[in-house]
C-alpha cells in the first residue's frame, strides 16, 4: 500500500493537490514502482481540476483516463470497506484512537489482498459492459 494521509476539514482541489505532491512519488518509490505505474482517478471534481490534472501528468509515468460518466471501478472502495470492518472491531471513542487504529490496520493490508483486487478489475469491466454502464454487483 502507498501512504495513508489524513485531512482535517473539507477536501478540495488544493488539499488534494497537497496530498498528491506529498505522497504520490514517495509511495511509488516505496513500492518500487516509480517508473512503472499508472495512476487512476475517478471523475471527482477535485481529480479533474486543471491544477490537479497538470500535477498528475507531470509526476506520473502513466495516467488511466476515464470518460466523464464512467462507472467507478476503483478498487480502493474495497479497501475502505475492509478498513471499516477492521475499525469496527475496536472500541473507539476518540479521533486520536481512530487515527492510531487506521494506521495499524493500513499497515497490515497484504500484497496478496491488493493483488486480488487488481486482478478483479477485468471482471468488473466485463460486468460494467454487460450492464451497459449501469449499476453492477461491485
Image (cartoon, rainbow, N blue to C red):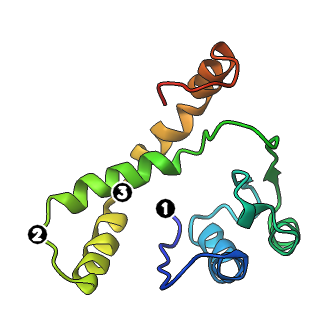
Q: Is residue 25 visible?
A: yes
Residue drawn 11% across and 69% down? 91
Q: Which residue is mark 2?
A: 91
**CA gap, disc 1 and disc 3:** 7 Å
Q: Does the residue at mark 1 contact the one at mark 3 (Cβ under 8 Å)?
A: yes
Q: Is residue 113 above or below residue 26?
A: above
Q: Residue 99, image x and y in percent?
A: 32, 79
Q: Is residue 111 visible?
A: no
Q: Is residue 47 above or below residue 133?
A: below
Q: Earlier in the sequence, mark 1 or mark 2?
A: 1
Q: Nearer the viewer, mark 1 or mark 2?
A: 2
Could you say which quadrant of the image residue 135 lies in?
Answer: top right
Q: Earlier in the sequence, mark 1 or mark 3?
A: 1
Q: Secondary structure at mark 2?
A: loop
Q: Residue 86, image x and y in percent?
A: 23, 57
Q: Which residue is mark 1?
A: 1
Q: Nearer the viewer, mark 3 or mark 2?
A: 2
**CA gap, disc 1 and disc 2:** 25 Å
Q: Residue 19, image x and y in percent?
A: 63, 79
Residue drawn 50% across and 77% down? 5
Q: Secondary structure at mark 1?
A: loop
Q: Residue 49, image x and y in percent?
A: 82, 68
Q: Give 5 or 24, whichever is nearer the viewer.
A: 5
Q: Earlier in the sequence, mark 3 or mark 2?
A: 2
Could you say which quadrant of the image residue 39 lies in?
Answer: bottom right
**CA gap, disc 3 and disc 2:** 20 Å
Q: Secondary structure at mark 3?
A: loop
Q: Which residue is mark 3?
A: 109
Q: Is residue 70 above or below residue 61?
A: above
Amino acid at each position: 500500500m502507498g501512504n495513508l494521509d489524513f485531512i482535517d476539514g473539507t477536501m478540495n482541489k488544493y488539499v488534494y493537490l497537497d496530498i498528491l505532491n506529498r505522497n504520490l512519488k514517495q509511495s511509488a518509490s516505496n513500492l518500487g514502482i516509480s517508473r512503472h505505474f499508472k495512476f487512476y482517478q475517478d471523475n471527482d471534481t477535485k481529480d479533474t481540476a486543471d491544477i490537479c490534472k497538470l500535477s498528475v501528468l507531470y509526476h506520473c509515468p502513466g495516467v488511466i483516463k476515464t470518460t466523464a460518466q464512467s462507472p467507478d471501478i476503483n478498487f480502493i472502495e474495497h479497501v475502505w470497506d475492509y478498513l471499516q470492518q477492521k475499525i469496527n472491531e475496536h472500541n473507539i471513542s476518540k479521533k486520536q484512537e481512530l487515527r492510531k487504529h487506521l494506521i495499524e490496520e493500513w499497515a497490515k493490508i497484504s500484497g496478496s489482498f491488493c493483488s486480488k483486487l487488481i486482478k478483479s478489475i477485468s471482471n468488473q469491466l466485463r460486468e460494467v459492459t454487460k450492464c451497459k454502464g449501469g449499476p453492477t454487483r461491485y
